[in-house]
Image: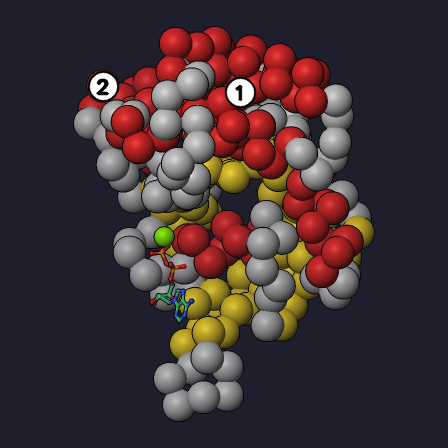
Amino acid sequence: MIELIDVKKAFNHHRPNEHWAVNGVSLTLEGNRLTVFQGPSGSGKTTLLTLIGCLARPTSGRVRLDGKDVSGFPERFLTEIRRGTFGFVFQQYHLLRGISVLENVMLPGYPAAPRYGTLRRRALELLERFELAHKAHAKVEWLSGGESQRVAIARALINDPAVVIADEPTAHLDTALAKGFLTIAEELRAQGKTLMISSHDPLVCEAPIVDRLVRLRDGRLAESA
Ligand code: ADP
Ligand code: MG
């Protein structure tokens, strides 16, 4: 469903500090799979996830989504595609402070504009599913790390995306919470979601639910199972 063809991404392109964070990756990523991108810090995991999720455009190479070459699409189409296809759980969660948990979960749902009541109900259902209903009206700055992450996951699911992308989801969690994340990942996988997860946590990389482990080093594929 997602195909990367010799994808490269440079930061500070054509400047003295040019750095190729992703440096020639070709991969076919099938749907309904849980893929883990494993690699040391700086190996290009986050950058690769942003390319897969159409948050950024490659400097060269192609990204195909369901057969469509999206790498050259204008920004407004990319935004549409992103919203309809991907849900993101960022490493630092990127929850908006000062507004409630419920509002945070609803936020990515506004542009697609279902009725306010429908969106709100959906957000509450997601919070309930992740045992956060009692926190719906709390401000996000009052949440614990594990709760923040579950809110981030609920938010990623608000538009019912086919693909959920999670960047080092267990980096700030203790073992029990990391296992909790894996349980959620397993449920999503069972529902037919495609999951793309970056991690260097052995608990994630060696989890039995992982369908495919893609190893990265210096922006390239190391080896792939
Ligand atoms: P990982 O997620 O595996 O730690 P990243 O994709 O974040 O790796 O980064 C890969 C490399 O690209 C690193 O050397 C990092 O310093 C560099 N990099 C990432 N983002 C930027 C940026 N916005 N500007 C300049 N360099 C960046
Ligand atoms: Mg990273």
**Mark drawn on residue 166:** none
User: Residue drawn 38% across and 38% down?
Assistant: 97
- Amino acid beneath label 2: Ala
Whichever of callouts 2 and 1 sits on the residue coming sooner in the sequence is 2
Mark 2 and ligand 2: say if the CB distance to the nearest ligand atom is below 8 Å: no
Dot 2: element: helix
Three-letter code for the amino acid on which mark 1 is drawn: Leu
Find disc 1 in the rendering and name its residue. Answer: 188
Q: Does residue 211 appear to the left or right of 144 in the view shown?
A: right
- 10 Å crowding of disc 1: few (<14), some (14-19), many (20+): some
Q: Is residue 14 visible?
A: yes
**Looking at the image, which is closer to me, 111 or 207?**
111
Badge 2 vs badge 1, beta-carbon distance below 8 Å: no
- Give the residue number, with chain letter if any, for mark 2: 176
Badge 1 element: helix
Question: Mark 1 near ligand 2 (CB under 8 Å)?
Answer: no
**Would you place residue 133 above or below residue 78 in this image?**
above
